[in-house]
Amino acid sequence: MRRVGPLLLLSLLVAGRADAREALGVFEGWGAFRDDRPVRCFAIAEPVRRVGRKAPWRPFASVAHWPAQGVRGQLHIRMRALKLHGAPVWLSIGDQRFQLAAGGADAWAPDARADAAVIAAIRSGTSMSIETRGQNGRPLVDAYALRGAATAIDAAALACARLR
């Protein structure tokens, strides 16, 4: 486990509000957390490189588990700006490319099978990028380092596995 700077840690802690958040660990650039209400466990990171202007909010990529809803390993990406209506959103990991479902500034794998494929690619990849067109028509691209992602995803999965 490696210590991270205060900006990443702040981003991880404010990515969503919860009554009680337990930090499970920080692994390279990825953190793992567990919330009590609603009960969820997730791995999360912020982009290492953003192309274009500064974001109006903090972008992130996460993989979450929601035991009460029976959801395991759900990808969620918050882009740094709103996307152009109708523009496709692509996630690239190594030589694999996935089209995501998206609305506004958020993107997800279209189904559980795609979630599993993305997570498998994350586990074997070194970096990933998400790309689309912003509302201004310009490219909207964020890049993520994947070192530590598999460990953070596993820590989140284990934290929620005992809650089923």
Image: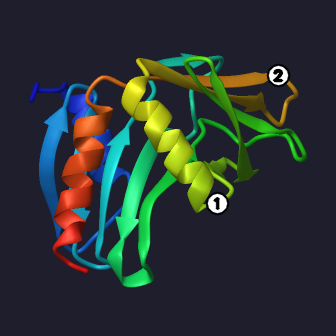
Q: Position of residue 139 (x, y in %)?
A: 77, 21
Q: Position of residue 96 (x, y in %)?
A: 63, 25
Q: Position of residue 161 (x, y in %)?
A: 22, 69
Instruction: Identify the residue at image location x=90%, y=46%.
Output: 86
Per the image, the residue denoted by label 1 is 111
Q: Locate the C terminus and report the quarter of the image it occupies.
A: bottom left
The residue type indicated by label 1 comes to: Asp
- Quarter of image, res 6: top left
- SS label for mark 2: loop
Q: Is residue 118 above or below residue 121?
A: below
Q: Earlier in the sequence, mark 2 or mark 1?
A: 1
Q: Is residue 72 visible?
A: yes
Q: Is residue 20 left or right of residue 69?
A: left
The colour scheme of the drawn protein is rainbow
Instruction: Identify the residue at image location x=72%, y=51%.
Output: 102
Query: Dot 1 surroundings within 10 Å: few (below 14), some, or many (20 or more)?
Result: few
- Checking the image for residue 138, the label placed there is 2
Q: Is residue 27 above or below residue 19?
A: above
Q: Is residue 143 visible?
A: no
Q: Is residue 96 left or right of residue 116?
A: right
Distance, label 2 to label 1, CA atoms, is: 28 Å
Instruction: Identify the residue at image location x=19%, y=32%.
Output: 27
- SS label for mark 1: loop
Total marks drawn? Answer: 2
Is residue 129 or residue 154 the one in the foreground? 154
Query: Dot 2 surroundings within 10 Å: few (below 14), some, or many (20 or more)?
Result: few
Is residue 132 or residue 155 the one in the foreground? 155
Q: Position of residue 138 (x, y in %)?
A: 82, 22
The residue type indicated by label 2 comes to: Arg
Of badges 2 and 1, nearer the viewer stands 1
Q: Is residue 37 left or right of residue 116?
A: left
